[in-house]
Image: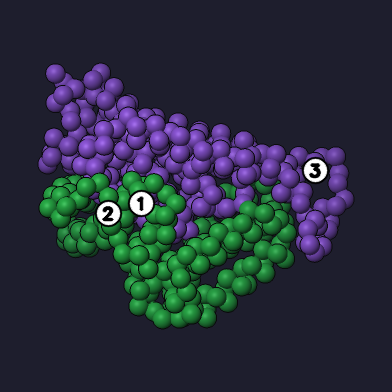
Chain colours: A green, B purple
Amino acid sequence: MIQLSYLDYIAVERKSFLHRLSPKLKIIGMLLVLFVIVTVRNLPGLFLLYLILLTLFFTARIPAKIFPLTLYPLIFAILFIFLSGFQIFFILLIFLKVLCGSTGVILLLASTPYPSVFSVLGRVLPSIFVMALFLTYRSIFILLTVLEDTQHALYLRGGVQWKHPWRSLINIANAFGHLIIKGIDASEKMYESMMLRGFKGKIHYRRE
Amino acid sequence: MSHIHFPDGVLPFWLWASGFIVAILVGGLFLRLTKKEELTRRLPLLGMMAAVMVLGASVEIVPIAYHVNLTVISGILLGPSLIFLATFVVNVILALFGHGGITVIGLNTLTLSIEGILGYFLFRLFWRVIKRLTLATFLATFIALLFSTFAMIGVVSLGTSHYEELIHQEGKGIFEFHLSKEKEEHHPGEVDEEKVNLRRFMAIVLPLGFIGWVLEGVITLLICRYIYRLRPDLLHLEKETL
């Protein structure tokens, strides 16, 4: 999940033709990719789409170390191998659909800051939902800081050692418990500061 | 385990579109049942718990690609209405991260929120009956996950005819593409091999799921115990004992 902050950093810091493109256009592009994924049922079509996405990925100055993120969903696609009765065509079709989808979204997020994506979504989705998205996004970064501190404390207490599964489980659970309590405290402070700044049930954000 | 890590384009259109419609209707109903002031006041908490769930999804238990959902503990802390909105938000963020398709967000929200909502009610019920925090939390988590996994299998089974259609799509399309020519010669005994095998799918998912239910149950009970030691007020248990 650390990659989330790195993705956000790349989206803001890097300058390429894709980064300069309007978020609205990129979201429309992503919807087009989705449309192709949903409708196209032949391997060459999907392979062509994947090649286009790969070209965009490597020409948009997105670091190669982000690339493994696009392969991660393949782990779950393996379940489909068992469902299909090991049909090569079906497996390749599913894998290409997975790769196109994940490369598309990673491409979108590595070139568009989350707030810009949410602000576009805010035009079509209910405000309460977009506010929840914004607050979750903000909270992830607050909790990541807490998580880093917790990790240090965890290592000092033996960390996660699979030789001692029960102790490791207790450590993991305590870390999450700590994270939740810190998160709830932070949410109370967040609400108070939002009220002090005149929050009346709607967050106003800067447009593009 | 209940999170459907399906890519886009695998489930039939009617299924994922219905998932979105039902999720929007249920979400709308829950929002109507919640007072606006209450919703506004608890929105930062919702965001924080959704963030905890997103972070939980990043802790991978490597050998079986299982991650904790933390939906039950979030359900216990947020209540049934807010957990629904929280799971919706979590699924959108996870989908934007390539973790599950965008088109299955609605279905994922429905299956994951079963965990949260059922977990909340079962936890209250078991707490009233057993009065033991660890057991009540474990049982609530285990049963909630069991139900949501079966809900996920149910969703998968609804698309069976569509998967078969996809399997037999080979060679159709813009270009001819033959990867397994030898399969064109069918023998009577091989017919079943080409069909979608839901039993095989369940045989993989259920044992993995069982490990997941136990792991999540243990982690949730330990988290619950930790919260009970430090901030028992968050669990609202006093009201239940009166």
Q: Is residue B61 visible?
A: no
Q: CA distance from mark 2 to mark 1?
A: 9 Å
Q: Which mark is residue B69?
A: none
Residue depicted at 22% across the width and 59% down the height: A142
Residue located 46% across and 54% down the image? B95
Answer with left or right where residue B120 lies relative to residue B149: left
Say which element carries label 2: loop
Q: Position of residue B152 (x, y in %)?
A: 51, 38
Q: Which residue lies under the disc numbered 1?
A: A130
> Please, what is the three-letter code of the amino acid marked with disc 3?
Glu
Three-letter amino acid code at the position of disc 1:
Val
Q: Position of residue B172 (x, y in %)?
A: 80, 56
Q: Is residue A199 left or right of residue B30?
A: left
Q: For the residues carrying marks 1 and 3, which lies nearer the camera in this image? A: 1
Q: Foreground residue, A141 or B185?
A: A141
Residue at which label 2 appears: A203
Residue B215 picture quarter: top left
> x and y percent of residue A5 in the render?
32, 67
Chain of the residue under label 3: B
Residue toward you, A64 or B191:
A64
